[in-house]
Image: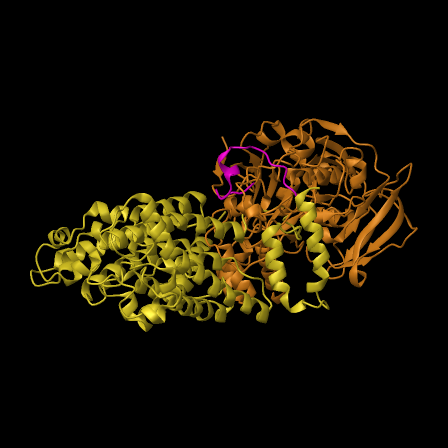
Chain colours: A yellow, B orange
Amino acid sequence: MNPVKLLEDKIEEARPLFEKGGKLEKLYPLFEAKETFLLSPATVTTGGTHVRDALDMKRLMIMVVAAILPTFFAGSYNVGLQALLAQGLSTDFISCMATGLMVTVPIVITSYAVGGFWEVTFALVRRHEINEGFLVTGLLFPLTLPPSIPLWMVAVGVSFGVVLGKEVFGGTGMNILNPALTARAFVFFAYPASISGDRVWVAGKALIFDKIFPFFTYSNESFVDGFSGATPLLVSASQKNGDVAAALGNAGFTLKQAFLGSIPGSIGETSTMACLIGAYILIVTGVGSWRIMVSCVAGALAMAALMNGVAGPESAGIMHLPGMWHLMLGGFMFGTVFMATDPVSAARTERGKIIYGLLIGALAVLIRSVNPAYPEGVMLAILFLNILAPLIDYTVMQGHFARRKAWRGAKNV
Amino acid sequence: MPTTISIRRGLDLKIAGRPASKILEAPRPARTAVQPDDLRYFRPRLLVKEGDAVKAGTPLLEDKDDPRIVLVSPAGGTVASVHRGERRKILEVIIELAGEETFEEHGALDDDALQGLTREALTERLLKGGFWPLLRQRPFACVANPDTPPKAILVCATPQDDFDTDPDIVLRGQEKDFQSGLDLLAKLTDGTVFLGIGKNAQCPALTDAKGVETRRFAGPYPAGDPAVQIYYACPPKSGETVWYIRAQDLLALARFVKTGRYSTERVIALGGPAVKERQLFKTRVGASIESITDGRLEEGELRVVSGSVLSGRKVPRTGFVGLYDTAVFVLREGRERELLSFFMPGLNKYTTTNTYLGSFLGKSEYALDTNLRGSLRNFTQSGIYESVCPVDIWPEQTAKAVLAGDIEEMEQHGILDCVECGLCTFVCPSKIEVGSILRDGIDLIRKEG
């Protein structure tokens, strides 16, 4: 018997349980989600448009997940690489990958499980469908965290992001801020010691035990003793004056390493190359906005050039950091490709997207440059522009109205 | 050489089942019908009852708001039944054809009388004969208001899409009647009469038309739509109207004015992925669907659409072709479910994005069915609607203004320029009926006046 038919029969058998009057009526959204996950819906069109494009929200989100996966694997490899380097162990590919995955997989699973729990809870209480957007949020958020993050922080962070970043507004499509970044910002401000500084970027023993019972090991055990793994951004920020590129070189960082991602940093953010693969997937499939990505980069390069121009000998080292380094370091590329392009929290008009992107890029570099205490500015820049996006759209729309009015007045037979 | 206008945005759907361009004679239908829903904002009052004998051209329905606007019987025979829907709304007045048809006579006119016809006399004749509703107006796509002359009239002589009857074929040999139709239209406006033709039109009735401004239209669907052509050739300013009529309708109108008799002839294209024999059929106005589809459809549960697959009306298989429609499209109802379809490469999936591998294979035709291909979600993806909208409207933002009930903002967005092509609904990954929302907004503006 055809498996689809078999599954369909099973589903139809179970359906009365979940429909109005059924015993498990309250769990209908869960039933719906599972059913439409397994089998595409049999719904047919109504109204005047009788056919539809094959793209739906599930496919859209799966494509985003596919675009994120390269950063996940590159990041996992790097987490393993950094940990093994710090411990002076052999760094062959298999060991790096295995060690890395031992660290990253529990983090991602925690994020999906806890976030998914909230998603389902809200769907049940508010009786809306379970939104696929969570597939993306649940993966994006852990990739912005340092590998040494305790799992309970992941759980708290993702809860904050999903509940306050998205669900209170009415779920995917209604939120103002990017939920993954909201979660990231929450963790950053709530637990600064675990997400910034120079000790958190290299995973320590990476034992599952430490991850699950972080209370026993919270102090410094999960970090490698005596190893200071400053990120390149931190190096450039703390460099007082003079040649920042040289300082980075002294600390052992090259542009090539930053591009490939073999430097300490948040799990998914280190490899610019993996981010670019993701960008390629997003742009080719038409899922992510190239306008936002390109204008983010342009904004950052312009602001970096400006900063380099105004920097004097007394300025902090990061003021001298060339634009190319800005693109490669920290979460800039990751934020540009995956966070800024979130269609819901970004500007929704085509012209607005360009303004939105330019401002993100410029603001990210500005924050990095003038506030050396907080070198990672891209997160705040995107969140800030998320809030500004409706205003940008409003302004762009007023321009559109004015142009339309002029066109109407000018056209004549 | 006439000016060519290229429409840049739009979308040619890669659907299988284009009709061949040969015209077949369809059997005489046993029944025809008038469907008041064809006319926007028409509030029908029934003038006949079941069992009445009617001639071709006898008024069956009049508009409660303007009783001069009537829908007449497209055939001589008897009123077989009046099909009503919810709240007794009249859906169809069905006429059983008599063996020997009789016609309402309005008196033939010779060439001199035609020349001397005044605007008032012509308007009167068209209203009486039931041919006035063939003239529609922008904005609102409703029947033209006989009291306010338009600033221009556009004759649309292009097929709506690849599945529609091409006037370039139908008008061959009809040069004289078509030209006299164009001359009649010139009487109805102080402005210009525009003729919109396809970029490859060859028929002398179109290429050698006199007394009109000819515009060639090129580009993807809906470049053949009269609303799009008006938008690019002669957009009405606020408070103005532009009338339009499709080529076959003009031909019928011209014949009626000349002979004083209802003109029944109509060529209909039968196409779509569920049609075995795809062809043009010479039949009559309001013909029953069965009379042209009989024996030509595939097995299974099918949907019959009168008009375009993107903007037409679903009709039952026992239904009738719409008054303005020159195409019947038949496709499968897509109730089949697929296992984990959104994980699959999707070699057979049709999407305008590149999210399924099928997009990279360069397949030219897909046997699309009516499946929604997903579930309803909030607006999520942006920019996708503007990329296909043929006019300068931002469908998502405009739809949001409609949902908020903000009439001023809807108008600022230019909602009245919406050509109702259905492309925004087609591409929406959240499966929102964007086009229907815009339509609701237009209706609201009309109602608030």
B426 or A311: nearer the viewer = A311
Please say if A99 is above or below B279: below
Residue A58, position as x, y percentages in the image: 53, 52
Please say if A250 is above or below A115: above
Q: What's the residue at 85%, 44% (across, down)? A: B104
A66 or B74: nearer the viewer = A66
Rendering quarter of residue B228: top right
**Which stretch is magenta?**
B350-369
Label the magenta part by its dominant secondary structure: loop
Q: What's the residue at 33%, 64% (across, down)? A: A149
Q: What's the residue at 31%, 44% (across, down)? A: A93
Residue B111, position as x, y percentages in the image: 72, 34
Question: Horizontal placement of A70 versus B324: left or right?
Answer: left
Residue B217, position as x, y percentages in the image: 53, 37
B87 or A167: nearer the viewer = A167
Please say if B385 is above or below B366: below
